[in-house]
Structure formats: C-alpha cells, structure tokens
C-alpha cells in the first residue's frame, strides 16, 4: 500500500478555493483504479491545505497522478504561495 500526500499553501481567507478543489478533485481521485481512500484537509487560519490518498499499488498511484495532476494544478494555478509539495510514501503500518 502507498500513500500520496500533496501539501500547498493557499494563504488565509481561501477556504472557497480549497472547497472548490475538494469538490472536483476528490471525486476524480476516488474514481481512479486502486484508490483506497482520499481526504482533503486544511487549516483556514494559516492557509495550509493538502490531499492524502491511500493507494493499493505504486503503479496505480503513479497512473492516477498523470490523470489527476492537470485538474489539481489548474485549481492551484494563481492561488498557491509556492509550488505544491508532492510525495509518495510506502505505508509501513495501517
């Protein structure tokens, strides 16, 4: 099992941007083969948000990234304070 975490800073007062991203991107991710779960999280007080996804295999995680990335980055374009941080981790324990 693998976990992908994407973190980004939208700045304060951007809850509507984060919600729009969650409304479109989370279902897209969930529909990808091998997706076990997807969570969108954030802190409105400092503008830090992220997406956490569990995948059954590294191959499915990477294939989904190629599909999801354009939609995700379109939502982030012009809103993020810096480039988003994206990492894929092997799950050690669940």
Image (tube, rainbow, N blue to C red):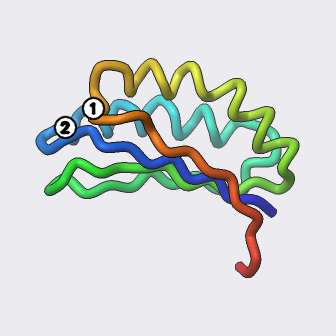
Direction from residue 8 to residue 33 in the image, left or right: right
Above/below status of 64 relative to 55: above
Look at mark 1 in the image and give the residue it sits on: 17
- Give the crowd class for mark 2: few <14, some 14-19, many >=20 residues within 10 Å: some
Res 61 quadrant in image: top right
Above/below status of 94 relative to 9: below
For the C terminus, the quadrant is bottom right
Res 22 quadrant in image: top left
Q: Secondary structure at mark 1?
A: helix
Res 83 quadrant in image: top left
Query: Where is residue 87 shown, x and y percent of the image?
Result: 61, 50
Q: Residue at x 53, y 21 (%)?
A: 71
For the N terminus, the quadrant is bottom right
Query: Where is residue 16 shown, x and y percent of the image?
Result: 22, 35
Look at mark 2 in the image and give the residue it sits on: 14
Q: Residue furthest bottom?
A: 93
């Amino acid at each position: 099992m693998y976990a992908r975490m994407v973190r980004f800073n939208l700045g304060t007062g951007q809850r509507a941007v984060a919600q729009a991203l969650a409304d479109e991107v989370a279902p897209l991710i969930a529909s990808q083969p091998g997706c076990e779960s997807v969570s969108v999280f954030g802190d409105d007080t400092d503008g830090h948000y992220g997406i956490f996804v569990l995948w059954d295999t590294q191959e499915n995680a990477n294939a989904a990234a190629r599909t999801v990335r354009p939609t995700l980055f379109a939502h982030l374009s012009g809103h993020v304070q810096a480039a988003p941080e994206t990492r894929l981790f092997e799950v050690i324990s669940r």
